[in-house]
Amino acid sequence: MSARPVFICSIGAVTAAGTGVASLGEALTNHAWDAPVGLERPDAPPLPVATCRDFSPRNVLPPLVARRLDRPARMLAVAAREALAPLGDPLPWDRDRVGITAGTWNAGTAALVDVLQAIFLTTPEEAPPAQFPSSITNAPASQLGILEKLGGPNLTFVEKQASGLRAVVEAARLLGHSRAEAVLACGVDEAQWLNADGFERLGVLARPGRAGMRLGEGAAVLLLSPMPSDTSLARLAGWGMASSCSEPWLYPENPNALVQACHQALGAAGMVAGDIDLVMSLANGIPYLGGLELAALQDVLGDHRPAVLGLNERLGEGGFASTLRTLVAALVMSGRVMPAWSPAPHLTDAGYRPLAARPHSALVTAMAAGGSCLALVLTAVD
Amino acid sequence: MKDVWITGIGIVTALGGDRETTWRRLVDGECSIRPLTLFDPTGFRTNIGAQVDDASLPLSDPPRHASRTSLFALVAATEALADAHLAVTSEPRPWALVMGGGAAGLFETESFVARRLRKGPRAHGLTEFLELFQDAPTDQVARRFGLVGPRITISTACSSSTLAVGMAAEMITDGVTPVALAGGTDAISRLVYAGFNSLRAVDPNPCRPFDRTRQGLTVGEGAAVLVLEDADHARSRGARPYARVLGYGATNDAFHMTQPDPSGAAWTRTIEAALTAAGLPADAVDYINAHGTATEQNDAAECAAYQRFFGERLASVPVSSVKGALGHCLCNAGGVEAAITALAVARQMAPPTVGFSEADPACPVDPVPGQGRPLHIRYAISSSFGFGGNSCVLVLGSCT
């Protein structure tokens, strides 16, 4: 754990609900809201992906800047501008002391496919040089660093569904070691048809008559700093990490690693299970994952039944999703939004309830296929 | 403050499928760069690479659907654990695993993509897609060796694995874990080969870091895994160290996606941050294992950083790049270079810059031409720079 406190000072988002945290907040307060779903393929029916259909960087990024960036870099840049805006210009820190951590599952896939299309359908000489740099996973975070002239550590993490929460935890660790004075902790993913086609072949996407997940896209950004401010939304009170061993494309056989991560996080925060007011559910529509989470919650929380809020089944699953869960937890804890969304049925059946009052603490978790698990405890600033 | 030892090293490169073969051939000045056979390079600007000989890899019972990248990592991790005299078993151990993520199963996935693009939705294929995601090799290593502690896959392009080693060491000093496996793995793919070709960043001949006539890099591949250990833990079981990990620094130059800031200013900050973390002054450094890609821009910017930081003393500090022998091992470049630097510290031998023959005024360094050179090394740095401006510097120290 960090010896320095870490606060979420400001946030920014691009989601299927729209551009900006306000759009997300409006969606959260509408119990019937659902995302635009359907990712077109050139030669087959659309796939269940929650897309940021109307996203445009216009009004935020100048055209000459936006044209250099691919879609995930644009979404991340727009979300980051929103998070940075409350701080004004100049920033209160030397820009060389501001870092970036990003979690992603599939950033760069569209550029990758563009290059491969050239190789396989024309000749390697046709490979577009401008696309190759965007095909590397760290491109969105690096482009953000270049755009905002941020010279601190710039790290991208790839841990499938847990990528985004890893970015948050490692941002806190950077601050704890004084490697930066502020860090933009980010999650970002893009919807790309060939990538989604692979998940369809795995049989994990929701289809009529088949429970499963919808993929998502978007960007979520948390500005973290050891210094609280009037606008701080929440404090990172503790975190934990552990893993189980499963094949890279399968969830673990048991919830043990998630349980361990939760206990570590609670212990680091100096809290017990009964102190948790809100659990940000990692459920994504895949029944097996829902079962693992439920078992972990029963183990960690015992008879305690805090409020539960889930996002993935509407906004989509991805590497960005666990950053977004952290963002929404902070937003709710700040009192700015009171979500109207109910927990998934299997959690309701187990006695977990929707939010009815502003929470003062939250547990955010993530579990990746392959077995990596993370847990984070947030507490209210006041 | 906990002391962190490197107690085991496993290496897979085009020079050899194990640590000792790679080291021996490297210090002898051999070059592994050959015509590429992994796929047909017709239509590319170059046709060479530093390709691992898959037949040389001593791996029994490979996991189903494992990519070449995962196989490299498993071989290197097996060697590292055995070298550290730790059990090569899948029994659960609460140790951390931190790896630099590269192409993972991209080479295999490319076959699926080619079929899917050409034949449409009825094209068969699923298993080749399973290891597309960059953390798949990390998962495979964890699964094979029962590593159930924190598991991290970091992607900062060519500095990924350097960061992995630095972050893993920091987890030990923080008391998160007594032992960590750290390093990286990456494999050549059509995408990377085409990408560097399209950027005209490749040399049609084997690369020549710091040489006046250099024309670019040569793509390579491989894996390196280091066993990092709390020194007290290592002492208690009688383990012998190669070197100590003293700290790391990481910054971003925020300059350009594919070109380093020619001033080297951010890279200088990285060196400063690393030595500060290690508690060392600039004049403590006896050897620099350079990124040294052999592109005109990289080598000049890197040397500019060294000049800014070390000043006149740079002339007396050997600076070598292993990429002339091993090619650019992509996201594993930093991992294999950290491993080679640890061996250099342990064996008091600076590895050579293979391919170097003609000094470049823009690179005023002693590149250790020819063969390895005996050298008194108390402290060394291993330096990496990745696309997107990410530099990372690792500080290693002698244990004697």
Image (tube, rainbow, N blue to C red):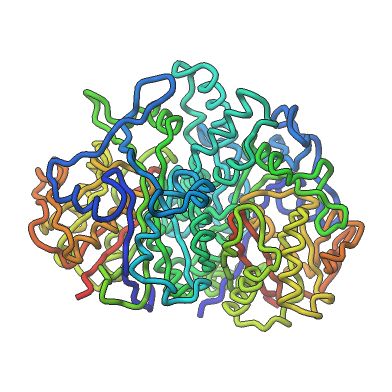
> Measured from the top left, where is residue B374 in percent x and y?
85, 69
| Left or right position of B230 against A246 | right
Image spot of residue A267 (x, y percent): 27, 69
Q: Position of residue B105 (x, y in %)?
A: 55, 37
Q: Left or right? Give the position of B82 relative to A3.
A: right
Residue B96 in the image: above or below residue B231: above
Of A2 and B250, which appears nearest the observer? B250
Viewer-side residue, A87 vs A208: A87
Nearer to me, A301 or B38: B38
Relative to residue B172, is residue B49 depicted above or below? Answer: above
> Which residue lies at the image location 77% right of the left edge and 62% below the top edge?
B300
Q: Position of residue B230 (x, y in %)?
A: 53, 71
Which image quadrant for residue B339?
bottom right
Q: Quadrant of the C terminus of chain B?
A: bottom right
Query: What's the residue at 53%, 22% (across, down)?
Result: B117
Against B82, residue A126 (above or below) is above
